[in-house]
Image (cartoon, rainbow, N blue to C red):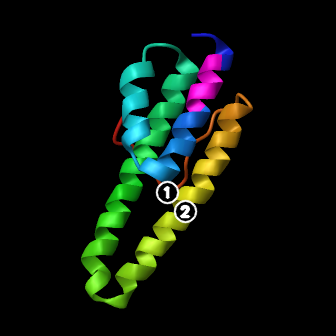
Amino acid sequence: MSPSDEKLWSTLIHVGGIFFAFIPALIGYLVFKDRGPFVRAHTRTALNFQITMAIGYFLGVVLSVAFIGLLLILAVAVVVVIFSIVAAIAANNGQAYKYPLTFEFIK
């Protein structure tokens, strides 16, 4: 895979997480993990971030019986949008990016 293709797919996977949660990162990781170190690193970090945020959404739903759950869901949504955009910009510029607030499920 050419470096420009790696940057393109990495960018699309980060942006896709805003709309489709962990699905683009999971598909991207499974398809592109052996096609280059840049795209592998970005899909892995995106997948770890999206899994972490899915846990946050789940906790928000569980806690939604109390008002705090709704605030948690809103906070997670804002974090996903902001950090996914920052990661997409870094990927498009050919830079490595590590999401904050992320557990390493995939190493």
Residue of label 2: 79
In the image, farthest residue toward the right:
93
Question: Does residue 107 appear in the picture of this structure?
Answer: no
Image height of 101 relative to 93, above or below: below
Task: Name which residue lies at 39% across and 45% down.
Answer: 22
Decide if residue 98 is on the left or right side of residue 25. Answer: right
- Front residue of 78 and 19: 19
| Mark 2 neighbour class, 10 Å CA radius: few under 14, some 14 to 19, many 20 or more | some
Name the secondary structure under disc 1: loop
Observer able to see residue 47: yes
- The N terminus lies in which quarter of the figure? top right
Amino acid beneath label 1: Leu
Q: Do the residues labelled 1 and 2 touch (CB within 8 Å)?
A: yes
Name the residue that disc number 1 marks. 101
Q: Give the range drawn in magenta.
A: 5-10
- Picture layout, residue 35 above or below residue 29: above
Predominant secondary structure, magenta span: helix
Residue 94 as seen in the image, left or right of residue 16: right
Q: Which amino acid does label 2 sit on?
A: Val
Residue ID at (55%, 41%): 14
Residue 12 falls left or right of residue 4: left
Q: Position of residue 84 (x, y in %)?
A: 58, 49
Which residue corresponds to the image point at 48% horizontal and 38% vertical from the top-left? Answer: 45
Residue 107, position in %: x, y? 38, 32
Q: Which quadrant holds residue 25?
A: top left
Q: Which circle's residue, 1 or 2, is located before the other in the chain?
A: 2
